[in-house]
Image (cartoon, rainbow, N blue to C red):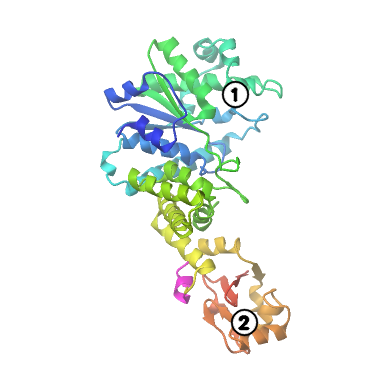
């Protein structure tokens, strides 16, 4: 696979340095991308760069993931409106350890979806704190600080955009560290290509300057466009905030729903960026989406395309178990024909995701067993009164854990709880409620 050609048809190529096409054609190469450990988890925004490394490896090259254990301690000014709040060292180390584990899982799960995973290159993880741990300030100024002139550093967009609002020397020096990172990886691991988002172009080319000036060698750079939604908003955000790649922070169901709720105008772009299916299949789906946006009636086909992309990515991020959970919860909330067995198959994490998507009531364990009519009226807002609750039960509208209840004298006890805590109640076909017992 031709790496650059792959990025071109996917719309993932923004900038590159001259000569890189020939460089990649001559032999398998090593390339890297840096990841910032200032967040508690990787996000779907980070996954754009993970996909870049996956395509790099599919082309037979070797990938290096560089975690910013050092650079995360000072903050990257690139396209930030103001100075970052510095994280504690303990917090950064904890984040890095978690993200390192996530990264290992992401590449393993992606490999399972490739038609020929054996054809991919390898991946290595490095922490750039190892480059600076034993370097004192005088060594830094002599070895690193002498490489780039102030005028060169001032010319970078990441610096220019912050001059009026304020830029500390700490963040100004960020590009020195990232540049030296490239030099260290070049000399110690033979890494000749650095990749990243377009906002990193200035920092990445500072790295190529380090290699050129200090080693008298040639290094290369590739960047992807910053991925935005059709409305101009930032990709990877929802109404609730970040879409995390950690199932504890963003449940597999919410992750799955993010893709199902994708704006039709964004779908073709997302297919090209994230799907690992054959090029012909991806482009055929993109053509269907474009025809739909052009006025043709392809609503059902576009819905199926979204569902397929949601399934592909949920399985790749959260595994087969996570996908099954997301699909079960989706069916319970929005589908038809869900059974008590479907509800019982959900784990406790799935019920926690349910609590964020349907009205949820907390009930003290001491009230159990409780008459069903009391539960519906006195301990919740399922019905406005006990008489309304009685009519609903007699009208066969009430289901507890997907089982219809026709007896108004029924009671709910601890044995009815799922995972010893949860109870799902339905009033009619569309109103669903979750009870949590504490």
Residue 347 visible (yes or no): no
Q: x%, y% of residue 116?
A: 27, 44
Reply above or below: 181 against 236. above
Q: x%, y% of residue 299?
A: 48, 58
Q: Separation of disc 1 and disc 2 at Cα?
A: 63 Å
* Residue 378 sits in quarter: bottom right
Q: How many marks?
A: 2
Residue 280 visible (yes or no): yes
Q: x%, y% of residue 384?
A: 73, 78
Q: x%, y% of residue 97?
A: 48, 40
Number of residues whose C-alpha sits closer than 10 Å to that of mark 1, classed few (under 14), some (14–19) or many (20 or more): many
Q: Which residues are magenta?
A: 339-346
Q: Residue furthest front?
A: 295
For mark 1, what is the residue?
158
Say which residue appears at 60% left-offset and 40% top-offset.
Answer: 232
Q: Secondary structure at mark 2?
A: loop
Q: Nearer the viewer, residue 69 or 230?
A: 230
Q: Which numbered disc covers residue 363? A: none
Q: Secondary structure at mark 1?
A: helix
* Residue 152 sits in quarter: top right
Position of the N terminus by quadrant: top left
Q: Nearer the viewer, residue 321 or 205?
A: 205
Reply above or below: 40 against 189. below
In the picture provided, is 20 more to the left or to the right than 91? left
Q: Main secondary structure of the magenta part?
A: helix
Q: Which numbered disc covers residue 369? A: 2
Q: Nearer the viewer, residue 108 or 428?
A: 428
Q: For the residues carrying marks 1 and 2, which lies nearer the camera in this image?
A: 1
In the picture provided, is 117 more to the left or to the right than 350? left
Say which residue appears at 50% left-offset and 39% top-offset.
Answer: 46
In the picture provided, is 322 more to the left or to the right than 3? right
Q: Nearer the viewer, residue 385 or 308?
A: 308
């Amino acid at each position: 696979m031709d790496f650059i050609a792959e990025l071109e048809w996917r719309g993932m190529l923004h900038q590159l340095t001259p000569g890189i096409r020939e460089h990649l054609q001559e032999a398998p190469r090593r390339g890297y991308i840096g990841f910032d450990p200032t967040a508690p988890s990787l996000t779907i925004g980070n996954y754009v760069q993970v996909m870049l490394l996956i395509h790099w490896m599919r082309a037979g090259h070797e990938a290096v993931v560089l975690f910013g254990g050092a650079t995360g301690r000072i903050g990257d000014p690139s396209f930030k409106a103001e100075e970052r709040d510095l994280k504690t060292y303990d917090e950064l180390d904890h984040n890095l350890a978690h993200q390192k584990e996530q990264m290992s899982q992401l590449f393993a799960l992606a490999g399972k979806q490739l038609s020929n995973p054996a054809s991919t290159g390898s991946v290595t993880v490095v922490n750039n704190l190892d480059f600076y741990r034993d370097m004192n300030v005088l060594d830094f100024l002599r070895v690193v600080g002498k490489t780039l002139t102030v005028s060169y550093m001032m010319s970078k967009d990441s610096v220019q955009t912050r001059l009026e609002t304020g830029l500390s020397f700490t963040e100004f020096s960020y590009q020195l560290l990232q540049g030296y990172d490239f030099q260290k990886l070049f000399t110690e691991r033979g890494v000749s290509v650095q990749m990243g988002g377009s906002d990193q172009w200035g920092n990445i080319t500072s790295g190529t300057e380090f290699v050129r000036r200090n080693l008298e060698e040639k290094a290369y750079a590739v960047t992807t466009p910053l991925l935005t939604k059709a409305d101009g908003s930032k990709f990877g955000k929802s109404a609730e905030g970040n879409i995390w790649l950690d199932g504890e922070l963003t449940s597999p169901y919410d992750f799955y729903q993010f893709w199902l709720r994708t704006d039709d105008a964004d779908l073709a772009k997302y297919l090209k960026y994230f799907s690992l299916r054959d090029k012909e299949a991806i482009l055929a789906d993109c053509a269907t989406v474009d025809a739909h946006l052009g006025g043709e009636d392809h609503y059902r086909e576009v819905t199926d395309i979204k569902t397929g992309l949601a399934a592909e990515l949920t399985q790749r991020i959260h595994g087969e178990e996570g996908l099954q959970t997301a699909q079960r919860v989706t069916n319970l909330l929005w589908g038809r024909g869900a059974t008590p067995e479907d509800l019982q198959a959900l784990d406790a994490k799935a019920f926690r995701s349910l609590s964020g998507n349907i009205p949820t009531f907390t009930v003290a364990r001491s009230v159990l067993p409780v008459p069903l009519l009391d539960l519906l009226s006195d301990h919740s807002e399922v019905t406005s009164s006990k008489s309304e609750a009685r009519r609903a039960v007699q009208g066969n509208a009430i289901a507890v854990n997907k089982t219809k209840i026709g007896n108004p004298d029924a009671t709910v006890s601890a044995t009815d709880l799922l995972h010893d805590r949860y109870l799902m109640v339905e009033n009619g076909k569309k109103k669903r409620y979750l009870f949590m017992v504490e």
